[in-house]
Image: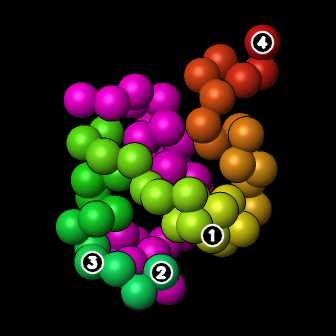
Amino acid sequence: MIEHDLAHQLKAARIDKGYSQNDIANILNITRQSVSKWERGLVYPDLDNLIRLSDIYNIPVDNLIRVNHKK
């Protein structure tokens, strides 16, 4: 499994904005299963989707990917 900080950040941001996994999948034109895999830490989103997620959630990419980014 990959680093869970990104997975946690993605899930928390989605829930905070009130989106379902299906909503995000539709916006990004991908499968809901892809969103689920990102949020479970099984795979990373590709760079294009990571940037789009950053825009959707209004969170800088750096804040999504850095572990302990507030330190």
State whether residue 71 is above or below residue 4.
above
The picture places residue 60, in percent across and down from the top left corner, at: 77, 50
Q: How would you rate the neighbour count of disc 4 (Cα within 10 Å): few for under 14, some for 14-19, many for 20 or more?
A: few
Instruction: Kindly report the secondary structure that dominates the magenta region of the rendered protein.
Output: helix
- Label 1 sits on what residue type? Arg
Residue ID for mark 1: 52
> Which of 19/65 is in front?
65
The picture places residue 59, in percent across and down from the top left corner, at: 74, 53
Q: How would you rate the neighbour count of disc 2 (Cα within 10 Å): few for under 14, some for 14-19, many for 20 or more?
A: some
Q: Which residues are magenta?
A: 1-27
- Badge 1 element: helix
In front: label 3 or label 4: 3
Image quadrant of residue 23?
bottom left
Marks 1/2: CA distance? 8 Å
- Badge 4 element: loop
Quarter of the C terminus within the rendering: top right
User: Upstream in the sequence, badge 3 or badge 4?
Assistant: 3
User: Upstream in the sequence, badge 4 or badge 2?
Assistant: 2
Image quadrant of residue 17?
bottom right
Residue 23 is at least partly visible in this image = no
State whether residue 24 is above or below residue 54.
below
Q: Please name the residue shown 24% across and 29% down the image.
A: 1
Q: Please name the residue shown 42% across and 41% down the image.
A: 7
- Kindly identify which numbered label has been placed on residue 28: 2
- Badge 3 element: loop
Q: Please name the residue shown 65% across and 18% down the image.
A: 68
Marks 3/4: CA distance? 34 Å
- Label 4 sits on what residue type? Lys
Residue 47 is at least partly visible in this image = yes
- Kindly identify which numbered label has been placed on residue 31: 3
Residue ID for mark 4: 71
Marks 1/3: CA distance? 15 Å
